[in-house]
Image (spheres, rainbow, N blue to C red):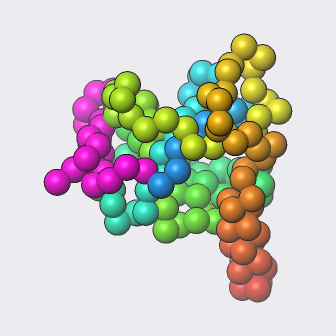
Amino acid sequence: MSKHQGSCACGAVRIEAGADPAIVSMCHCLQCQKRTGSTYSVHAYWPREEVSVTGGRTAYRRAGDTGCYITFRFCPQCSSTTDWDVEAMLDLIGVPVGLFADPAFPPPTTSIFVPHKHGWVVIPEGVPQNEGHGAAFLDAAAAALARRTEAGS
Ligand SMILES: [Zn+2]
Ligand SMILES: [Zn+2]
């Protein structure tokens, strides 16, 4: 039974999650600002096996600010970002919180790239503020980069 159900703007891509997300991240990075056209983006991360995504999507891969790659997927009809993979933590899947159209969705557990935050954006009280990604993310990213170097690519 799914606990959270979402879709892209046109409904061609559907997302179901069986539990609350492990991480809800408020991202102020400039890349998210460009991707969304908004001033920040809010991301939910789950263990991959807890989420099902159905419907055709187009992928776009880019380097993140920490040097590891992220593959974003989006609906080719309505252009909503639907989900993504972070190379450094492939056991998780990222989904934009807005896809659930649910004002009662769990709130942020962390905020990242805070130096790029617009001055008027207020981070909820008690939510950790990180200059880049949080320490756990950076550790995972470093491990992924080390594996790639060892592989000689
Ligand atoms: Zn769509
Ligand atoms: Zn971002």
**Which quadrant holds residue 115?**
top right
Rendered view: 52 above or below 4:
below
Residue stretch in magenta: 1-21
Q: Residue at x 52, y 44 (%)?
A: 24
Q: Nearer the viewer, residue 148 or 22?
A: 22
Residue 150 left/right relative to 84: right
Count of numbered circles on the image:
0
Q: Nearer the viewer, residue 120 or 71?
A: 120
Rendered view: 59 above or below 90:
above
Residue 70 left/right relative to 141: left
The quarter of the picture where the N terminus appears is bottom left
Q: Residue 28: image x %, image y %?
A: 69, 32
**Residue lying farthest front?**
126
Residue 128 left/right relative to 86: right
**Which quadrant holds residue 114?**
top right
Q: Residue 53, can we see it?
A: no
Q: Residue at x 37, y 49 (%)?
A: 20
The question of residue 81 being in magenta is answered with no
Q: Residue at x 28, y 27 (%)?
A: 10
Main secondary-structure element of the magenta-colored stretch? loop
Residue 89 left/right relative to 5: right
Q: Residue at x 68, y 19 (%)?
A: 121
Q: Residue 22, can we see it?
A: yes
